Amino acid sequence: MAVMMASSLFLALGALTAAAAPPPGVWTPDQGNGSYLNPVLQGDYSDPDAIRVGKDFYLTSSSFANIPGLPVLHSKDLVNWKIIGHALPRLSPVGHYRTPRRGGGVWAPAIRYHAGRFYIYYPDPDFGIYMVSARNPAGPWSKPVLVDDAKGAIDPCPFWDEDGKAYLIHAFAKSRAGKNNMLILKPMSADGTHTLGEGRVVIDGAALPQVATSLGMADWSVIEGPKLYKRDGWYYIFAPADGVKNGWQAVFRSRRIEGPYEARDVMDQGPLDDLGPANGPHQGALVDTPDGKSWFLHFQDTDSYGRRVWLEPVTWKDGWPVIGREGVNGIGRPVAGGEKPIQGQPEMVPVAGDDFAHGLNLGWQWNSNPGKDWADASTPGELRLKAVPSSANLWEAGNVLTQKLPGMTFSVTTKVMLEPRNVGERAGLVLMGRAYGFIGVVSTRNGVRIEQVVRDSAKNGDPETQVVADAPVTGPVWLKMTLAPYIHPTGPSQYSPQWPAMERLTDAQVSFSYSRDGVTYAPLGEGFVSQPGEWVGAQLGIFSQAPMGTPGAAAVRNGSAVFGPVRIMR
């Protein structure tokens, strides 16, 4: 009875929400009636991995060049999540990451619990595979230990077998290693601190026969992100294949950890006449609830809105998982929602915005390793940001303090008071990405002015376009930024098979306004269409700087900007 009801609920919710737009404001997956809607994490929690310890679930994700890195989230029901800390206060090498290395840093991690300790293994494709550990998942975590220095090694996952032997499985980034589409299994020391030898290829995509997908037979490509499990005497490798937006979830199984492995596509978006609600549903974590049921957390790429996390039910047939609801040839498809895995837990979402009542909350991340004097949150209710000398192109500036996008359609407001010491110092409210735009205040020879700036191709160093309000400012200014989804076509893709998501982009139409009294807002500038960052979605943020080429860039002393609460609204 319960299975039939849950199945019906999954189908009904899938039909209901496939075409429905999410409500404005901060997204809440818990519907308050015992059901949930995907995504369970609206923010950009790329490459998620999760575990259960007792009655508690813990999740971590890629953080790339954002600091602090390796967010750690906690849940009691797989639907309602809270950030409880970060495992990485600084990126190593520290000096290298004082510059924002867009697309570098922490790639897909794995979290595990072994012998009374939590472990996170993460790759930096330019430096190797690292491990941090802790008794308490909220921290403190140990300093990173270099476990393996293979060139271009990515997406590690540790595994401690029942006989006490330890292993590490990982993939390769072709951009660094010159090869990919293969998974390597290496013996590892029992304490998990270093690999032992070169290991062996256990999955070679180039040598595999074609796989059946919902769109027909396909070659294997870009196999990466492996997670290794053991269940009922079988070793299972869960791994994404075929890229990010177009990818599917593969599973490989064997009676021996060294292989040989059988292979299947166990979840994709489905046939063109019956698409599931999420494109590229893949890369994530298999977890079980205390009642023995299986669930799968994975990401789904939504361009400027990042890689959002979805929750899927898992059923087992003949020793193979079916993720989501069963479709063509037994291949699973993502569901839009369903009955919550565990009932009775309070609604909760990761923090968004900040009232600065108790310093910086855990939602903030810098764009590089920060300086100790960049921020002062010692006064309750406000945040003082130093006018740090940095590139006028914010893509190249690490002193931008950012958060993940908490919804699809929303506004964000803050109050700012510029206290400059030099001409050119500026501060503002920004949406960061390969293109960015902000509204803020700038110190000029004729006083402080309100400005709205757009840089359409920040990654390529294109110039800013600037609109400046007429009247000077003598006190605080309230800033507002409003986002709404903007879906537009892109060029043809070379992927085969190809789902429709490869032919469109989901970005945000962004507009800006300001107020001198915090009540009445006036628009400024034409706004812009967002772009994602490098392997991340767009990010909302605040900043204060003395741009290079202005007097403050080489001044003995610099001013600052005082920000009031950052609020997320419908």
Image: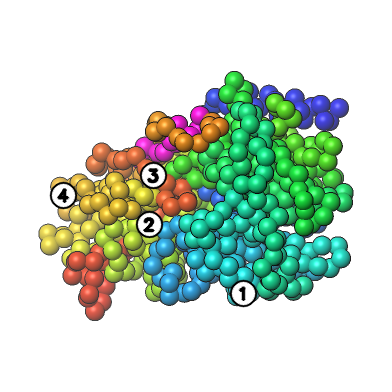
Q: Give coordinates of residue 531: x percent, y percent.
A: 38, 44
Q: Nearer the viewer, mark 4 or mark 2?
A: 2
Asked if residue 537 lies left or right of residue 159, the reply is left
- Element marked by disc 3: loop
Marks 3/1: CA–CA distance: 35 Å
What crowding class fits label 3: few (fewer than 14 Cα within 10 Å), some (14-19), or many (20 or more)? many
Residue designated by label 3: 531
Marks 4/3: CA–CA distance: 31 Å
Residue designated by label 4: 471
Vertical relation: 32 (above or below) 122: above
Q: Give coordinates of residue 125: x percent, y percent.
A: 52, 63
Q: Tell me which numbered mark, 4 or 1, is placed earlier along the sequence.
A: 1
> What's the magenta region?
500-510
Marks 2/3: CA–CA distance: 18 Å
Q: Give coordinates of residue 264: x percent, y percent.
A: 71, 39
Q: Amino acid at mark 2?
A: Ile
Asked if residue 246 lies left or right of residue 492, the reply is right
Looking at the image, which residue sits at the far bottom? 556
Q: Tell me which numbered mark, 4 or 3, is placed earlier along the sequence.
A: 4
Q: Give coordinates of residue 88: x percent, y percent.
A: 56, 68
Q: Nearer the viewer, mark 4 or mark 1?
A: 1
Residue designated by label 1: 145
Residue designated by label 2: 542
Pick the front one: 6 or 258: 258
Q: Amino acid at mark 3?
A: Gln
Task: State yes or no: discs 3 and 1 in contact (Cβ < 8 Å).
Answer: no
- Element marked by disc 4: loop
Q: Amino acid at mark 4?
A: Ala
Looking at the image, which residue sits at the far front? 207
Pick the front one: 267 or 204: 204
